[in-house]
Amino acid sequence: MSTKPEIILSALDLERLERLLEKTQFPGKDELESELERANVMDPKDIPGDVVTMNSTVRFRELPDDAEFSLTLVYPKDAGQEGTVSILAPVGAALLGLSVGAEIEWPSPKGRTLRVRIEEIIYQPERAGEFHR
């Protein structure tokens, strides 16, 4: 049995996500709520720069293929644009709070499962001093 990686969450992201969960029904809601409950919650100014937070742009590497791609973790209102993944998608919920170097399984549109590693946080609002995004 594998253990879940530690996740770090900003208090601001937690507050916004709890409000979203109160008014939204979607598949995977229980899983996202469980992730939020186990998170290590910090003041946004204390979030390490290598952690995936809301509105972070992340560079991934497919394993073992070495192909790279980038996505931005967004709220549902910003989803649907190319290069974004919604926090309400299972992959989005799995990404939140992970750090550079973490590996996760990623369902592909072709029905297979990819293994990806977080290579870099290209942009993180907290690291950029943007606490109201």
Image (spheres, helix red, strand yellow):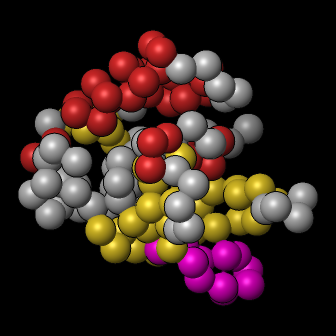
* 80, 51: nearer the viewer: 80
Q: Image point 53% across, 20% down: which residue?
A: 24
Considering the image in quadrants, where does the N terminus appear? top right
Q: Residue 56, position in %: x, y?
A: 35, 59
Q: Residue 32, position in %: x, y?
A: 55, 29
Q: Image point 59% across, 82% down: which residue?
A: 68
Q: Image point 51% across, 73% down: which residue?
A: 70
State whether residue 123 appears in this view: yes
Based on the picture, tell me whether residue 98 belongs to the magenta stretch: no
53 lies left or right of 45? right
Magenta-drawn stretch, dominant element (helix, strand or loop): strand
State whether residue 118 appears in this view: no
45 lies left or right of 133? left
Magenta region, residue range: 59-69
Looking at the image, is 13 positioned above or below residue 110?
Answer: above
66 lies left or right of 6? right
